[in-house]
Amino acid sequence: MLKIDQLTVEQRLELMERLWESLSATPEAIPLTRAQRAELDRRLDDLEQEGPRGIPWNEVVERIRKQSQ
């Protein structure tokens, strides 16, 4: 049995990352509630009507780097 409480913080973060990656490899295996499905459908409808909102990741990183200079 894995004794999570005996792992270091770094080890637990690594474990979480590996678990997340394993779950994201098969997203269809993760069931959604009715409320989650409805919210996802609403957001997809908004995206189709309004187009993408926000800023690309590379712009976010560039802004952060400029602020820290």
Image (cartoon, grey):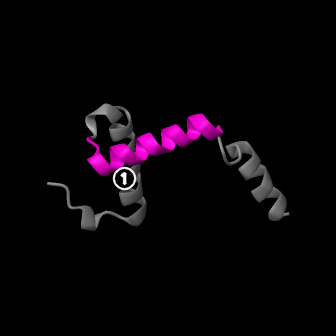
What residue is shown at x 26% (from left), y 66% (from top)? Answer: 6
Above or below, 28 against 57 in this view is: above
Q: In the visual, does 44 lie left or right of 36?
A: right
* x and y, in percent, of residue 68 in the image: 80, 64
Element class at badge 1: helix
* x and y, in percent, of residue 51 in the image: 65, 37
Q: Nearer the viewer, residue 14 or 52?
A: 52
Q: Nearer the viewer, residue 50 or 55?
A: 50
Quarter holding residue 64: bottom right
Q: Can residue 22 be seen here?
A: yes
Q: In the visual, does 17 lie left or right of 59?
A: left
In the picture as drawn, the residue positioned furthest to the left comes out as: 1
Report which residue position mark 1 lands on. Answer: 16
What residue is shown at x 19% (from left), y 55% (from top)? Answer: 2
What residue is shown at x 37% (from left), y 65% (from top)? Answer: 8
- What is the magenta segment's predominant secondary structure? helix
The magenta stretch spans residue 50:
yes
Magenta highlight range: 31-51
